[in-house]
Image (cartoon, helix red, strand yellow):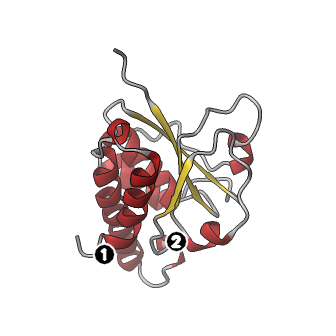
C-alpha cells in the first residue's frame, strides 16, 4: 500500500524567515511523508538573506525558496492541504482564507528573528534560535503516527507541540 503524502502549509505574515525555515525543515525531516509549503498574509517579496545563508550552511536547498502570498494556496489548482500551522503571532490572529478540505490547524508561534535589533551576531543568533525551536517542533510532528490517530487526538497533539516544547529544548 502506498503511504499518502501530507501537504503542510506554514504561515507567517511576511513569509521571509520563520515560515521559510519551517518549510525547509519539514521537507527534509518529513522523509517523503510530508510536502511542506510556506506563505504569508503580507509577503515581503524576498526571503531574508540571513535565512538563506543559514539554510545554505546547513545544506538545505534554497534555490526554490520564495516569499509568496497565502492566496496562492486558497486558489483553484492549489495543493490540497492536510495541515496549516501559523508560526508567528500576527498570522495566528489574522482571518485566514478558507482552506478547501478543512485542514487541521495549530499555532506554533516563535519570536521573529528579523525584528531583532543590534549587532549582526545578535541577529544571527536569534535566527539560529528560531531555527532550533522550529526544528524541535517539526521533528516531533514528523514522527507522529499521523495515520493511526483519529482527528481529535491528532488535533490535541498538534496543539501540545506548540505549547509544551520549551524554548530551551
Q: Quote the CA–CA distance across marks 1 and 2.
A: 18 Å
How many numbered dots are placed on residues in this image? Answer: 2
Tell me: 71 left or right of 152.
right
Quadrant in which residue 134 is drawn: bottom left
Q: Quadrant of residue 169?
A: bottom left
Query: For the view shown, which residue lies furthest in the top direction?
Result: 1
Neighbours of disc 2 within 10 Å: few (<14), some (14-19), many (20+) = some
Q: Position of residue 72 (x, y in %)?
A: 71, 41
Q: Position of residue 60 (x, y in %)?
A: 36, 42
Q: In the depicted view, which residue is nearer to us: 77 or 18?
A: 77
User: In the rendering, at what x and y percent does residue 18 appear?
Assistant: 49, 61
Image x and y of residue 93, in percent: 65, 72
The answer to which of marks 1 and 2 sits earlier in the sequence is 2
Decide if residue 97 is in sight here.
Answer: yes
Outermost residue toward the bottom in this view: 118
Q: Secondary structure at mark 1?
A: loop
Q: Quadrant of residue 127?
A: bottom left
Q: Give the structural element (helix, strand or loop) at label 2.
A: helix
Where does label 1 land, which residue?
A: 167
Neighbourhood count class around disc 1 (C-alpha, 10 Å): few under 14, some 14–19, many 20 upward: few
Q: Is residue 69 visible?
A: no
Q: Which residue is mark 2?
A: 114
Residue at x 30% of width, y 63% of height: 132
**Residue at 68% from the left image edge and 41% from the top image edge:** 73
Comparing 109 with 44, the one in front is 109
Amino acid at each position: 500500500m502506498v503511504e499518502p503524502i501530507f501537504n503542510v502549509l506554514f504561515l507567517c505574515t511576511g513569509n521571509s524567515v520563520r515560515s521559510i525555515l519551517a518549510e525547509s525543515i519539514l521537507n527534509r525531516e518529513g522523509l517523503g511523508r510530508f510536502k511542506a509549503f510556506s506563505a504569508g498574509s503580507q509577503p515581503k517579496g524576498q526571503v531574508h538573506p540571513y535565512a538563506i545563508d543559514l539554510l545554505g550552511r546547513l545544506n538545505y536547498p534554497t534555490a526554490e525558496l520564495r516569499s509568496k502570498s497565502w492566496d496562492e494556496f486558497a486558489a483553484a489548482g492549489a495543493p490540497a492541504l492536510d495541515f496549516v500551522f501559523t508560526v508567528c503571532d500576527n498570522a495566528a490572529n489574522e482571518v485566514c482564507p478558507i482552506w478547501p478540505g478543512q485542514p487541521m490547524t495549530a499555532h506554533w508561534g516563535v519570536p521573529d528573528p528579523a525584528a531583532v535589533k543590534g549587532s549582526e551576531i545578535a541577529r544571527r543568533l536569534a535566527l539560529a534560535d528560531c531555527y532550533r525551536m522550529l526544528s524541535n517542533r517539526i521533528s516531533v510532528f514528523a514522527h507522529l503516527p499521523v495515520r493511526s490517530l483519529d482527528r481529535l487526538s491528532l488535533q490535541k497533539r498538534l496543539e501540545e507541540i506548540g505549547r509544551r516544547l520549551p524554548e530551551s529544548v
